[in-house]
Image (cartoon, helix red, strand yellow):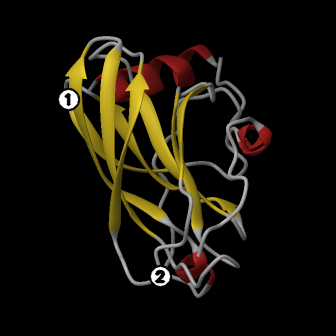
Amino acid sequence: MAKILLALIIILCGCWMSSESQIPQSQPISATTENSKLAQVLKVETTGEPNNYTFSVTVSSPDTGCDRYADWWEVISPEGELLYRRVLLHSHVEEQPFQRTGGIVAINPHQTVIVRVHMSSNGYSPMAQQGTVRDGFSPVNLPEHFAAILASVEPLPKNCAF
């Protein structure tokens, strides 16, 4: 409900932000061959307390080995600020979907965040999860190039084990 009201206010006042800084709006993604090359965050669970949360993230990715694998997932703000990154050290060819835990993520329970995954071969997937610790997470399709600059921000994988 709050997202709908925010969108209406933004539209009515004519102050729509650029896609680099806006809260992503859900957009359908068609089922194409290209999408079969994309990873996606299927589920996000959290434990902990304010400013000290652990995220458990379930990812589905079309890993083929070190040539193409999900090399990290990250928690970012709707404005595109990196809050936490969980680097994945190897491919998960035989383990799909897979779940990995990471944190500490210093956010409050009602702070909206986005959890997305990155593929070594083709970058960020637009298929992510958005929500709060308090209310949970749901699928969101991010705009193309949303916070793409984060792909060069440390920590980054050093190599792929297998």
Residue 138 appears at what percent x and percent y? 30, 46
For residue 153, which quarter of the picture? top right
Residue 50 position (above or below residue 45):
above
Element type at marker 2? loop
Residue 36 appears at what percent x and percent y? 53, 82
In-front residue for pair 114/25? 114
In-front residue for pair 132/162? 162
Horizontal side of 19 relative to 72 (left or right) equals: right
Q: What residue do we see at 37% from left, 27% from top?
A: 3
Horizontal side of 23 relative to 113 (left or right) equals: right
For residue 113, which quarter of the picture? top left
Q: What residue do we see at 70% from left, 45% from top?
A: 156
Name the quarter where the N terminus is drawn: top left
For residue 66, which quarter of the picture? bottom right
Name the quarter where the C terminus is drawn: bottom right
Residue at the spot of label 2? 93
Residue 8 position (above or below residue 45):
above
- Tell me the amino acid under the disc marked 1: Asp
Residue 160 appears at what percent x and percent y? 65, 66
In-front residue for pair 93/162? 162
Contact flag, marks 1 and 2 (Cβ < 8 Å)? no
Residue at the spot of label 1? 135
